[in-house]
Image (cartoon, grey):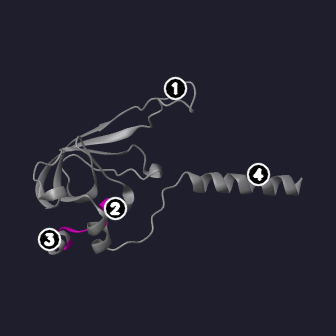
Amino acid sequence: MICRLAIILLIFDLSLRVKACSCMPVNATYVFEHSDFVSRVLVERAERTSGNFPASLMSDEFRPPEMIYTVRHLDVYKSPNSTLDIPTQVRTPGDSAACGVNLSEGQTIVLAGSWTPSHLSIFLCSHGSISQEEAERLRI
């Protein structure tokens, strides 16, 4: 009986650890160098998608919920090929356990992340690791 209880507690503990986002500590220089873009933005709109949960989770159609932010770029510190035509849509997982970033409408913040032609992507481990002062100092 005690053995079963110990196994159940172990499984429960492991399941809690799997659901959490964890990040290795990184400094601002590392974040700046390994990001496609670094920009100080004003969050103008926040929208949560419901995701797509098909009958089978093994389906190619599965999409988890996302947060989609519409932003205005106030200062661009880094962008691919020094382009200033930077997407205004920023996507992140819809849950902090999946390393999603929670932003508020009206918030001004420095974001760093990856770039696609249609949108930018940010994750919990990269966006908050760089201040405006550090971004200005590291500007390319």
Distance from disc 4 to disc 3, alpha carbons, whole Å, reads 51 Å
Task: Give the image quarter of residue 88.
Answer: top left
The circle drawn on residue 90 is none
Q: Which residue in the protein does label 4 denote?
A: 8
**Amino acid type, label 3:** Glu
**Which class describes the residues within 10 Å of circle 3: few (<14), some (14-19), or many (20+)?**
some
Distance from disc 4 to disc 1, alpha carbons, whole Å, reads 30 Å
Distance from disc 2 to disc 4, alpha carbons, whole Å, reads 35 Å
Q: Which residue in the protein does label 3 denote?
A: 136
Q: Which of disc 4 and disc 2 is earlier in sequence?
A: 4
Distance from disc 3 to disc 2, alpha carbons, whole Å, reads 17 Å
Q: Secondary structure at mark 1?
A: loop
**Closer to the observer: label 4 or label 1?**
1
Residue range in magenta is 126-134
Q: Which of disc 2 and disc 3 is earlier in sequence?
A: 2
Q: Which of disc 3 and disc 1 is earlier in sequence?
A: 1
Q: Position of residue 135 (x, y in %)?
A: 19, 69
**Amino acid type, label 4:** Ile
Query: Mark 2 and mark 1 in contact (Cβ < 8 Å)?
Result: no
On the rendered image, what quadrant is the C terminus found in? bottom left
The circle drawn on residue 54 is 1
Q: Which residue in the protein does label 2 denote?
A: 126
In this view, 43 is above or below 136: above
- Is residue 139 found left or right of 59 in the rendered image? left
